[in-house]
Amino acid sequence: MPANPNIPVIAIDGPSASGKGTVAQLVADKLGYHYLDSGALYRIVALAAQQQQVIWSNAQALGALAKALNISFKDGEIYLNDALITELVRTEEIGRGASEVAVHTPVRAALLDLQHNFRTPPGLVADGRDMASVVFTDAKLKIYLTASVEVRTERRYKQLKSKGLNADYDKILADLQQRDLRDSARSASPLIQTPDALLLDTTQCDIQQAVDFVLIAYKKLA
């Protein structure tokens, strides 16, 4: 059972580039809750492994590395061993690495307690792949947020172009398809919609509509 069971949690799961991070952050801001971007933790592990020359397929070494990481989130920035790494973990390469290291049970076990520690008053909005199914199984509200892979590709493409970065639509599409397969097929905490999670398909709705959906659903539970 996760720590602090009396503190409410909204768990939002979904595939890459579905918009769940943006929605979760805005919902947290609206409610005055804390926010957990669990995907960032796996990106940090991938980055740290790269820096320490640990290959992303070495499950035991990655698990040991994950246990020893000193991670902190301050004012929207991400720090590893007190070094600012926000931009480093947001690259497409590290995104792929996060999906690869996340398949390993030792890594997921090492990060479980860290994720539970984010559950502090007045509440938490957590997004990821297994927030509802594994990490916060007693979440007050569970959302499975998704969109078609074509729409997700277009969003990621526009996001990268807006940052002045090179972007190849076909490469992004193939990458997302591979991530979807890896995330849903892995043996350790696969990406699933739990039976008690509400489906939120953002293929034809914008961010504000998605935020309103979550807030209205949460209000109904009050």
Image: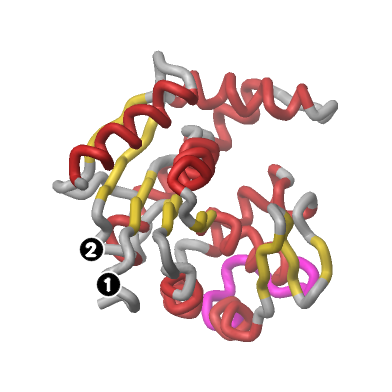
Q: Is residue 110 left or right of residue 83?
A: left
- Tell me the tag on residue 138: 2
Label 1 secondary element: loop
From this viewpoint, which residue is outermost toward the left? 195
Looking at the rendering, the stretch of residues picked out in magenta corresponds to 50-61
Relative to the observer, which residue lies in front, 79 or 9? Answer: 9
> How far apart, in angstroms, are the residues tagged by discs 1 and 2?
7 Å
Q: Is residue 24 left or right of residue 97?
A: left
Where is residue 128 shown, x and y percent of the image?
44, 52
Q: Is residue 140 left or right of residue 213?
A: left
Relative to the observer, which residue lies in front, 139 or 146? Answer: 139
The residue carrying pointer 2 sits among few (fewer than 14), some (14 to 19) or many (20 or more) residues within 10 Å by Cα, namely some
Q: Which quarter of the picture shows residue 80?
A: bottom right
Quarter holding the N terminus is bottom left
- What residue do we see at 27% from left, 58% from top? 139
Tell me if label 1 and label 2 are in contact, CB under 8 Å.
yes
- Tell me the tag on residue 76: none
